[in-house]
Image (cartoon, helix red, strand yellow):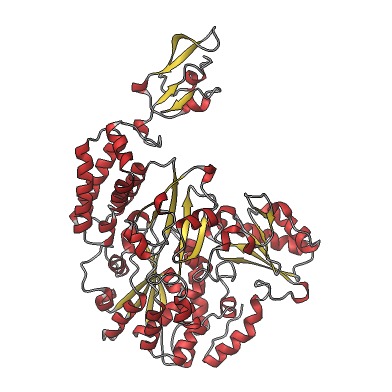
Amino acid sequence: MCLSKVKTMEELFCLSENLKGLLDIKKGKANIAGTMEISVCGGTGCHASQSAKLKDELVRFAKQYGVEEKVKISITGCFGFCEKGPIVKISPDHTFYTKVHPEDAERIIKEHIVEGKIVEDLLYVNPLNHERILSQDQIPFYKKQHRVALRNCGLINPENIQEYIANRGFLALAKVLKDYRPDQVIDEVKKSGLRGRGGGGFNTGLKWEFASKYQSEKKYVICNADEGDPGAFMDRSILEGDPFSVIEAMIIAGYAIGADEGNVYIRAEYPLAIERLTIAIKQARQMGFLGENILGTNFCFDIFIKYGAGAFVCGEETALISSIEGNRGEPVVKPPFPAEAGLYQKPTIVNNVETLANIPVIILDGAEEFAKIGTEKSKGTKVFALAGKINNVGLVEVPMGITLREIIYDIGGGIKDDHEFKAAQTGGPSGGCITKDHLDIPIDFDNLSSIGSMMGSGGLIIMDDRNCMVDIAKFYLEFTVEESCGKCTPCRIGNKRLLEILTKITEGKATMDDLNRLEELSNIIKDTSLCGLGQSAPNPVLSTLHYFYDEYLAHIQKKYCPAHVCKALAKYQIDEKICIGCGKCAKNCPVNVIEKTDKPAKNPKLFVYKIQQENCIKCGTCAKNCPMKAIVLL
């Protein structure tokens, strides 16, 4: 791909017009002389399931069947429907194939491209009526979504800047440089109501305004791509599928606050995102969107990649800045805020990937159009990583104000194995639980805060009646204890004490005094920790205590785990009325704690067996090997 430098805005407008047709087939607007396009999902999940090899196989068979001139085959970003990946989409008819493997490549080329027949068994099957669905927009998973931040994911090739330009890429930058003063850009972002998508939901335009007012010979824009919440992959997917939108937004932010340098702080564990971001920055430089005198103006801006080592605390902006400077990733007391004294003590703004991905749309379509989406105080859309006990695991982008019920049942396809919904954890380790009583509350920043949860970065973990909420709180505390930087005592020591109490509860060794200390200590840590990590670490404990107090009581008073998750409280028992005396449980027990009794079994020539509870390790091997299902977990 030969890339020429775009020297003026007029050249960009002409190039944009000339490239418009580049995506017409993918958008279903044209079918030029029978030409077709095959888009193969190239997100991390599909990539791990051999989508790159699948693409190579499609190319190979296209040559073998002599249709390489007729079909264009390319990798795109994440389609979002991770549960059904790898995904292949064929345009212009929008045929949507799911769970496609390299061995399916020949059939797709031979049957679909050469013979014009649909490969029926690769289509999505609606679980409600078992009908096969041909196109993406008819699949229930997509019907209630509204893609803004993810607008280009699954559409453009993330390694081809021309496809980004063909879909209005860099026109927002040109509009800003041509028609807006820096303060007008900030006003537009403020009017849009965009709030930070990385955690607390602070007004983005207001943050930019603070930084713009401080006078300095050097200012910085930082993109926070250090996505550390368990189960979260929103920012990573945007960088893998549409890195150019983040680059364009950072340039616009630089113009707005008077910065000439941007840094993308990304964890080194995201190799695919890093690779595509590196390619995108290189192409943006080649075309003159980064560097000196951008689009013929006197504005100069460049972007560099900074690697993180996967420390969760570096998602906090001051700890992130410290890490970029080469110091230990620890938060500092605020004020001063980064907008006044950030990177190298210069005015700095820090926005996460998803926040930035909205900026070009706000500039191009106008703040008023963006503000029409969502609720009064939470404008726009939110990307959620839907995971856990849900049928349709994946990445979804929905308008603010949608209910949890709609996300779980209309988009997510309901709970796995038809179990009962119990709770959803939002905001990762910093968030709290949403229970079935809150299924119909509109999801936005303020509503989630009012019920003891938070939006966070967008991880949405679904739990059912097979989950123990005490164990869930313990899991998140284990994570935050491991990830604490150790700088302040409430977080370093307090969270360890919380974890010790939770461990006692799950082992059946706790008392009611421990339960009282659990809540008291949680509130102390929340009030006295230095940064957001420590302040929010007790949230999973406090929310589960509030909504699932009875489960804590069962663990402490009855020494019983209602979900049968806590191994120390589990008890396997053989039902004497069902046992046939075959002895398979005893033969397979790894610690030999199952013995024959003198009670006759269903087969009168044999005797029932009994488990010695005091020495049982609760491995469940006996239950797995019982042919009569006579061994139950109590």
Rendered location of residue 194, percent (x, y): 40, 74
In this orientation, which residue lies closer to the viewer: 246 or 425?
425
Q: Quadrant of residue 445?
A: bottom left
Q: Position of residue 303 (x, y in %)?
A: 42, 77
The structure residue drawn at horizontal position 26% and vertical position 84%, both measured from the top left corner, is 214
Give the quarter of the image for residue 94.
bottom right
- Say whether residue 171 is visible: yes
560 lies above or below 346: above
**Residue 331, located in which quarter of the rendered image?**
bottom left
Left or right? Give the position of 634 relative to 418.
left
Query: Quick one: 513 or 152, which is closer to the camera?
Result: 513
The image shows residue 55 at horizontal and vertical percentages of 65, 61
Position of residue 497 relative to residue 50, above or below, is above
Question: How many numbered discs?
Answer: 0
- Is residue 259 visible to the viewer in this orientation of the structure? no
Name the quadrant of the C terminus: top left
Taking 590 as reference, is 85 above or below it?
below
Tell me the residue at 31%/68% (across/down).
317
303 w.r.t. 611: above or below: below
Q: Is residue 89 left or right of residue 519?
A: right
Q: Nearer the viewer, residue 363 or 12?
A: 363
Q: Please give the name of the residue rendered at 37% of the width and 83% of the height, measured from the top-left corner.
A: 186
What is the x, y in percent for residue 140? 59, 58
